[in-house]
Amino acid sequence: MNATTSLLARVDARTMLARADEHALPDVDEIVARVRREGDPALAYYAQRFGDPAPRRVPHDEIERAYASLDAELRSALASAAARIDTFARAQREAFSNLTTTMHGVELGHRLVPMARVGLYVPAGRHPLPSSLLMTAIPARVAGVAQRVVCTPRVSDAILAAARIAGIDELYEIGGAHAIAALAYGTERIARVDLIAGPGNAYVTAAKRAVYGTCGIDALAGASEIVVVASEGADPRIVAADLLAQAEHDPHARAILVTTSAAIADAVDDELRAQLDTLTTAATAREALANGGAAVVAPLAEIPALCDACAPEHLALQGRDAEALAERVRVYGTLFVGASVGEVFGDYGSGPNHVLPTHGSARFSSGLSVYTFLTVRTYERARGAIDRRIARDASTIARAEGLAAHERAADLRLLPG
């Protein structure tokens, strides 16, 4: 395969996942401000302007009807995926516990406190995503969040059934930047939330950035991305299928192959062409493939550092060296080791979450999980006589900083009781 005619252009692996330029979306600020100022009338205005259904709270009986009428195989698959997501979230929750320790007469500790009310955004533009509802609502439920509120641009039977399975409390047919503003500031109809989580398009992301500080957000997500590392013995059919599974998400998605062999790169390219011929989402996938490429890297020992520098959302290791490489990579949204654990399983409920950091943000952030919905509250409590050195040290440091009231508050505790 000639590199100039390949679907996966040969790329410089060290810059292949550099953060994309962010396009300014000035109208998002206007949308957020108007919803904050006007509330529900602004939601109705923007729904009409963007050709969306009229904003509404979906009634419980409509959710129940959708669940009952859904194709039985799909209903069973959603329920099974939900059970696996729940099991993994519970295991995560059990790994993080309340803490109590005593030091110099003071009991110190932290308590894990769930947020009271969270907003969960579920995309439904190009494709309705019931899987994203399960991925956001179930960890919130396991964390102990009392009120879980979903906003989605358009309801479908699958999304409604997922809402029923996940046990959400409120579901609104409202989408876009105006939905994010409504969740953050509240309207006459929708009470404000403590945190907004879930994926969305560029407008949703820009709105999350705009409201941050009024409420929390999980992350600022970009287009989906995958790096597949294919060492000797990797199956080109599976590698190509995994690349296409990410590429079909969105024209802005990026799918990247890293391999030690030009022959593997050529074989994967041939498979991509063959599979695109029968793919109903081929137009989107083909456009997205142009954003990625193939990097031929030798020696193998250079690949872990290269992957860490990319910090990809999804990192898949295939071929004979997959296990050895897995021990050495450390920066990614989520990792798939071996061809039998496809990224598609992560998307659809093998257990861990599919809402993950993109554009290199895995260097400093993690994917959505039960921890997203928990706060850590520390405390101090006297247990008998407190070591006077604590007060003396506090007084000394306060005096050095020129904070006289702090110094006095410390010194008072040194006086005889």
Image (cartoon, helix red, strand yellow):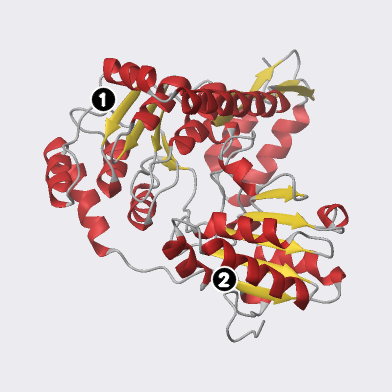
Asked if labels 2 and 1 touch by Cβ distance under 8 angstroms, the answer is no
Q: Is residue 258 above or below residue 357?
A: below
Q: Left or right: 219 with respect to 383?
A: left
Q: Secondary structure at mark 2?
A: loop
Q: SS at mark 1?
A: loop
Q: Is residue 186 visible?
A: yes
Disc 2 packing (10 Å; few <14; some 14–19; many ≥20): many
Q: Is residue 14 left or right of residue 194?
A: right
Which quarter of the rendered picture does the N terminus lie within?
A: bottom right
Percent coordinates x, y for residue 391 in the rendering: 70, 31
Indicate the amino acid at tag 1: Val
Say which quarter of the image contains residue 92. top right
Tell me where residue 109 appears, x and y as whole percent.
69, 24
Decide: few, some or many residues near mark 1? Use Cα within 10 Å; few <14, some 14-19, many ≥20: some
Quickly name the residue at label 2.
292
Question: Which of disc 2 and disc 1 is earlier in sequence?
Answer: 1
Q: Which mark is residue 21?
A: none
Given residues 269 and 190, the one toward you in this image is 269
Image quadrant in which the C terminus is located = top right
Q: Nearer the viewer, residue 190 or 239?
A: 239
